[in-house]
Image: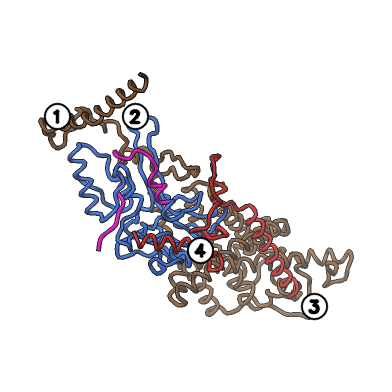
Amino acid sequence: MRSGLKLLSTLLVAVTLVAGPVAVGVALAQEPMQAGQNPTGQDPTADAVNEELLFKHESTIRGVVSIPDKRAGNLIQPQGREYRAFHERWLPWIAAVVILGMIVVLAAFLLIKGRMKSPRSAEKIKRYNVLERFTHWMTAACFIVLALSGLNYIFGKRLLMPLIGPDAFGTASQLAKYSHVYLAWPFMLGILLMLALWVKDNIPNRVDWAWLKAGGGVLGGHAHAGRFNAGQKVIFWMVIGFGLAMGFTGIALLFPFTLAGIHGMQLMQVVHASIGALFIAGIILHIYTGTVGIEGSFAAMGKGEVDLAWARAHHDLWVEEQQAKAAGGAHLGHPQPAE
Amino acid sequence: MKPFVVAVVAAVAIALGASVLLGAVQELAYQKFQTSAVRLSSPGTNLVGLKWNGDPTPADITEMTRDKAEEERLDAKGS
Amino acid sequence: MARMKFLCDADRCIECNACVTACKNEHEVPWGINRRRVVTLNDGRPGERSVSMACMHCTDAPCAAVCPVNCFYTTADAVVLHSKDICIGCGYCFYACPFGAPQYPRIGNFGSRGKMDKCTYCTGGPEPDFSVAEYEKYGSNRLAEGKLPLCAEMCSTKSLLAGDGEMIAAIYKQRVIKRGYGSGAWGWKTAYRETVTI
């Protein structure tokens, strides 16, 4: 009895399923549907979402996804275009002009004015202790690698890739990327150490203003200066400012989606690359003044001690201070205790 | 010279330390985007390699996955 | 040669995720990596639409432009592919992509996030067709077998269309004319700088 009823109902369902579409088909055949008309008479798209409309409200079309990666909910995010335009059209030119421009200016200066001469003497004066030199060279060594691997992101495919071929370039870039990402950490540590070591000597004061007005002795003659002259202070604050900015944006890129979303990361990359180019140009100036530009200056970071006469010419106020200190304790020329 | 050498060594040491630390906090896609639902197999290696770095180097291609790929290839060709 | 494109007819997509599953199975895409996903807009509200999205194989692809190692290339069928041997996993393509297509096996940090993976339009990679290395790195190569991407082939409502751009646009146009409505070819303006005009 029960099974008979079930059979009947199943049959009924089957008949409806088969007959239904046929009936509809017949109906449709009798009333041929006109193109552009919906048979139900309703407009099913009356409130359907529309790409153009959504873009009017927001620059990104967002939705929901059922997969755990919720970032995938961004359907269309055309902002990548601006990022691409900057990265491919502007950035290479900005970087090239800033960096090559600095090199050209310095080369021209060297050709016209030559090296800055300084008086010599037999005596030496201690300028940087071991910790200071260690910090400087750790940061400097990291910077060189970071700068080269950073430039590789911009110019590698344009200059290096045609020379060594895609496979070798891919491997080299992979290594460059690892060094960029991991050497960033000792670099950031170095920046913080520099800040701690030298901030007290780099507070701008009235002497700096006079130094700047005198043109820093670039055009002849020497201006008064403490341990660091105004030019060095500018370099110091540039290194600290740019270093922290590079560190911050770098970390934001290193940990995707922790500090910034996709647009934030695009912006971070733009800032990171632009500051990077300026930073490299600034450091080229620093390298120039620390080596070929000013005679006798390399010894400061190289050996840690400089010629006393050189120091008197470039950092007279600092030498006076050191000698005043020394007068109380140790003998002249070794104002600081030996390490 | 000495501070320079020490500085370079220190930089490399810190960099290596950073790489180890960053490697330790690195999350694999299947860990980050896992669901609470039932998982029927181990995460697999195709497209990502055994180390999940996307680099199936020849050493990583085990006999099993190689056979599987070969089988699929033949299947694909046959059908 | 054909200019291969994807077109998702959002008025037909029922968010069944079969395309996602088909893709995952065909290429053995590992967990956590989605070459294709279905995004639902206005979820639960009137006018809800779902769109299946993967790499759109853009004209003048932004990912290829920003790649610092030029690992991308475009095939004769206008499919945008990349070489995992050259890729350094920097993530620039991910910043530039309008569709969020690039995926990485490790999501943590820039340094070691691994080689990028994305939809290949079922076209494998630079390795020889049907080689084991190609399958291991990029998945199967259906185009070389004369087949279209599996996601579109599997689509139960034929919402997702794959094939020559002009042909699928014609199919879509015909549908829109026949049924009287259509919410447009999602992403075409962004990807191809053109849309299907009806």
Which color is chain C depicted in? Answer: blue
Amino acid on which disc 4 is placed: Ile
Whether residue B76 is visible, yes or no, is: yes
Which residue is painted at 46% across and 66% down in the image? C133
Q: Chain of mark 4?
A: C
Q: Position of residue C116 (x, y in %)?
A: 48, 58
Q: Amino acid at mark 3?
A: Glu
Q: CA distance from mark 3 to mark 4?
A: 53 Å
> Chain B in the picture: what colour?
red
Query: Residue A123 bears which disc, if any?
Result: 3
Q: Can you tell which chain is drawn brown?
A: A
Q: Which residue is disc 2 drawn over?
A: C46
Same subunit under labels 3 and 4? no
Kindly identify which residue carries mark 1: A27
Q: Nearer the viewer, mark 2 or mark 3?
A: 2
Which portion, as a residue range, is magenta?
C1-23
Query: Do the residues bearing badges 1 and 3 touch, measured as CB atoms within 8 Å?
Result: no
- Residue under disc 2 on the same chain as residue under disc 1: no
